[in-house]
Amino acid sequence: MSASAVHQVIPSLVRWDAIGNHSLQVQSILREMGLDSEIYVNDVGPEYAGKAHFFDRYRSQPGAWLMYQASTGSRLASWFAQRPEPKLVNYHNVTPPQFFERWEPRLADEMVDGRHQIAKLAGVARHGIAVSRYNEEELIEFGYRSTSTSPLMVDMSRFDTPSDPTTAGWLDRQRERGGIGILFHGRISPNKAQHDLVKVLVAYRRLYDPRARLHLTGGASSGTYRFALRRFIAGEGLWDGVDLAGPVSSEELAAYFRGVDVYVSLSEHEGFGAPLLEAMFNGLPIVAFASSAVPETVGDAALLLTDKAPGVVAAAIHRVVTDPVLRASLVEAGRRRLTELDLSRTRSSMRTVLSKVLEGQA
Amino acid sequence: MSEANESAFDNERVMAEIRDEVARRRAAGDFPPSLERELDLAFDRYVPAGSVSSDFTEAVKAADRAAYINVAVPTGSQKPGVGEVKRVLRKAMAWYLNYLAQQTTAFATASVRAMRSLGERLEMVEEQLAELVPARDDAADRPPVAPDLGQWASLCIERLPVRGRVLHAECGDGALLGSLVEAGVDAYGVEPRGPLVDAAATAGLEAWPDDPVEHLSAVAEGYLAGLVLSGCVDRLALPRQRRLIELAAAKLAPGAPLIVIATFPRAWATSVPPLEADLAPGRPLHPTTWSHLLGRSRFTDIVVQDGGDTAAVTAKRSG
């Protein structure tokens, strides 16, 4: 092996971020392989202050490679491209800008830049590692000549968090009043299509259960979209049926996953979809729109929809919550899928890919 | 198929059964396709303005760019001799292609011109229509200054019931709403100005970003156990103020209290920021006028309490 070190370059390393946790796993694998490995960032959360260095502290060393964790546009990409070291790109997907054009034109421009940056890196990177086959196809479209797929590394043990008692108590009281609870976790963002979930709630309440509730957890990527969503909810008279919880702690999130009846994703674009795994971990049945990398992530552990018509989604949710055989089948399939994506397996997959690349076999 | 997959359910079969169920419910009229379209349109109302008109302009520009038909067919080729053949064919057919291209270009150009003209006329119609429709206030134009309603808190707490939902529209930053909740009233608020709603939500109150008239339109008849109106009553155009009273009468349960906190016209010009006063579609009504209008609607026990610059008009929805 010619490499003596593989250092990672990440625009941002912050808590609760799936890509940040994935990067720490990559670092641990590289160190297990006997390589020197540090993380260089543009932005770091206080909880990771000792685990990363600002990129301007980076100093060349013989035999070092660089690996870029790509998920957004960043000035670090240009810096990375100009470095003389051999380069790898670990691609988590950059949201296509068309989802944001109407809502946040400035963010859409950043996404255009981000995708251009990833495409430009095709000319200088020796290999692109994607976290899903869907992402790998994008790398190939960008012009990467050598690519592979190794799933996002998620430490499922972090899902085993005690529930926040206040949130759990509140959800229990909601349940006692009757009506099912529907959950989606993800940033409030046009590509996640939370507005479609609100439409589904209207349909579900009309068709099956007037007391059904929708819980939307996660901070907002687009203030404009969030504001429109709130107006839409109020306009439909659903202020008592939709819980826009905003950013939640891992304990609060655990309470949500354990206090509802079904997890529903109508997202139009996911590079992987880590919350789907958390739903499986908590034994929640999943109903999901089969977009982007979602079918690949869930395998057979979700009722997959090819149609987002509110009536169809509502009927699918009703079927899942009222058919105990189907529900049990989905939950069991979720457990199997989690085993397939278990950290030891995904680490082994990443280690294999890295070994091949660094030995010049990929 | 792996062993794991053999025990899994059949997604195709389940989805086919679900689609049958949806078709059956639609046929029964439980969930007509028109409702799904209405939901799409309802959300589209909140998509940022400007995108539709700019789409139209861009579409016309794109059509304009495509209107010119170029007859100079590329004749290059990597195969020897083929380029020469293409050039000869192009020259031989030029008279025919030019004739067709001129007519097609003329048609496309005329179509684009017609589209532009239609767009301009549509814009004029929209402008004229806007003059006929009662003006709606634009929350974005109004400074996010929270009103001081503290002097009316005890009156509201005294009159409003602790059972049933009570709405405060517009609730500003939630100061009065907070007092009501603290007193045990199951109150929530609506407020169209984003920064004020966010302030109320941050304070742990249930506040929604919405226009009071639109919000009341969406509330079920007889749902509210009490209603407090402030802010909007001073600013709305007269037709919308009347609409507000109609909605209040419809959405309040029989016997439920209504409290209108109105600013005296004499004080209004000096008590609200000049920007808000100048851009307001309407002007405040005198409390006596509110009494008169409420009396003509389904309200009884109407009392006006003078509070200096503002007055509270309390009434009860008749049984």
Image: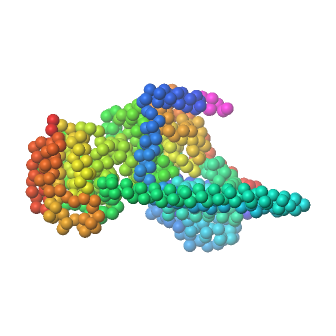
Identify the residue shown where x is 76% and y is 57%: B97
Residue A344 versus residue A330 in the image, above or below: below
Residue for point 21% across, 42% down: B249
Instruction: Provide residue B240's location: percent of width, then percent of height.
Output: 26, 51
In the rendered structure, the answer to whether residue B31 lies left or right of residue B84 reads: left
The front one of B112 and A303 is B112
Give the number of callouts. 0
Image x and y of residue A186, in percent: 47, 49
Foreground residue among A190 and B246:
B246
- Relative image position of residue A12 (x, y in whole percent): 52, 62
Residue A132 in sight in this render: yes
Asked whether residue A286 is in view, the answer is no
Residues in magenta? B1-9
- Residue plotted at (65% across, 70% down): A83
Q: Nearer the viewer, residue A105 or A122?
A: A105
Whether residue B6 is in magenta: the answer is yes
Query: Which image quadrant is residue B223 in?
Result: top left
Q: Quadrant of the C terminus of chain B?
A: top left
Here the colouring is: rainbow
Question: Which corner quadrant holds the N terminus of chain B?
Answer: top right
Q: What residue do we see at 42% from left, 56% from top?
A: B125
Q: In which quarter of the image is residue A303?
A: top right
How far across and down, in percent of the image, does residue B247 sit?
A: 25, 44
A308 and A328: which is toward the camera: A308
Quarter-of-image position of residue B95: bottom right
Residue with the most extreme right position: B81
Q: Is residue B6 left or right of residue A334?
A: right
| Side of B192 relative to B73 (left or right) | left
| B8 in the magenta segment | yes
